[in-house]
Image: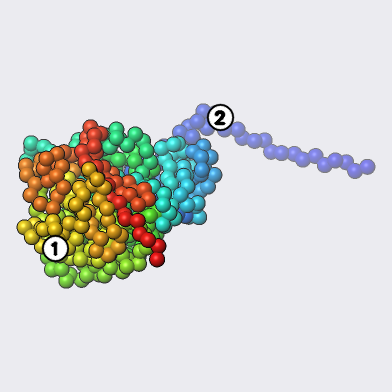
Amino acid sequence: MRRARHHTTRPRHRIPVVACLAISSLLVVAAPAAELRRSPYLMAPRPQGITILWRTDDSVHHTAVLRYGREPNKLDMVVQARENLRHFPGCRDWQADLRDLEPDTLYFYAVECDRAMLCGADERHCFRTAPMPGARRPLRFLTLGDSGSNRPRPDPIEAVLEEKEPIEAIGVRNGFRIWNKGRPLDGIVLLGDNAYPAGTDEQYQASFFNVYADELACTPVWPCTGNHDIDDAFRHIFPVAGRGLSGGVKSNSPHYYAADIGPLHLVVLDPWRNWLSDTPDPDHEPWRKQMAWLESDLAATEQPWIVVAQHFPLYCGGDYHSDDEPLTQVRRQLLPIFDRFGVDLSLAGHDHTFQRTYLLHGLVGPSDTYDPAVHRKSPSDGRTAPITKRRGRDGGTVHVVSGMGGGSRRAETFAHPAMVPIEGALGTSRPGNLVIEIDGDRLTGTLVDMEGRETDRFTLVHEQQDAP
């Protein structure tokens, strides 16, 4: 009978409990948890995906991932985030590109670095993928014009621009929240001058990301530049807009691009960095390239609604007047294209007031050449009765100036005769934001003040067209 073999083991050296605690303490000190420096924000929604960005300090040692799923407590999918080029010292900027999702579907997410959750897994951190192009699902957008300006103030202008606490922007945001009552948004459209005085990364954090962190955690942002976006931070903060991920013709520029969201074709333009910041010459090569792209993009779209956003208004008569340069030059360049391709709504900032035109066509000249019988395509002001518009070429455009997202300059008079009267004047200086809603053949714009009250409301309706 074979004997069982006995194995002998060497005595184990046990580490005292006190020593274990000391080693654990050292490990914690050596590898602290990453710190979230910029809360998540969403870009480039598409029917099958979205891009989510965030910022940490530089203590992330291994991985950054984004977990997501259909329920906040069941994030059963994960995507590895990649680090964008380091541009800001002491920070690491992360980007997660989500793919293979269901169209027009709600998802929840959480940000994780080095296996530690930094935020999310709750009702606040969520996103909805875009509806398919052409789908007639209702849409709602918040527009922010000159939200970094932080006016009014009795102080000298330099003191206003350098002020760290964006008091007026917070007031405008609060008014929107009172009015909106938590309803979901399909996007936030920035109309330029988003951070004063120079659009630096620090200024963007103070006047935009800190103010709208709750909205940005669940709402895609569509940014455009203004003349205060002097610093190069914009293209590092918003790196994905021009890649054509959301539809439209690919521009390969973060400063101008297009997107298709359900029934809407949204176009964002940049007359500043690609033209006016360098030269007043309209034959400037980057601007000519942008205009060629714009024409090709508008020629290609079949979306029922076309909205164009950019910083400089084609018509205004408050703080600035569109009879002056460079606004006259911008109008000469853009208006023939808008008329030819049937742009429905033109959104702009720059003038720190709110003004909107009647449905106009062909008014290239100065304000004293305005003739309602020639240039107005509809007699309606959009408030007492809807503005009815024929879709397509030469149907006319409503032009809106909404530059009061950070306060206003309290313009004493409004001088452009093509504007619809608001509160007895051809514009208003009451700070607020414009909300755009699209539902079928109807587009509605609502100006909401700091108290959550509606200062103005207009409706634009597409005429019913007979089938060919």
Using the image as rendered, state which of residue 121 and residue 307 is in the foreground.
307
Q: Residue furthest front?
A: 466
- Residue displayed at 60% across by 33% down: 14
Residue located beneath label 2 in the image: 16
Q: Write down the quadrant of residue 360 in the picture.
A: bottom left
- Does 401 sit above or below residue 244? above
- Where, quadrant-wise, is the C terminus in this rendering? bottom left
Q: Residue furthest right?
A: 1
Q: Horizontal and vertical percent for residue 398? A: 22, 54
Asked whether residue 348 appears in the rendered view, the answer is: no
Callout 1, which amino acid? Val
- Does 65 sit above or below residue 330? above
Q: With 203 as the anchor, is 160 left or right in this view?
A: left
Q: Write down the quadrant of residue 389 in the picture.
A: bottom left
- Residue displayed at 24% across by 63% down: 394
Residue located beneath label 1 in the image: 364
Asked whether residue 395 appears in the rendered view, the answer is: yes
- Residue displayed at 20% across by 66% down: 336
Using the image as rendered, state which of residue 288 and residue 210 is in the foreground.
288
- Does 250 sit above or below residue 77? below
Q: Secondary structure at mark 2?
A: loop
Q: Horizontal and vertical percent for residue 393? A: 27, 65
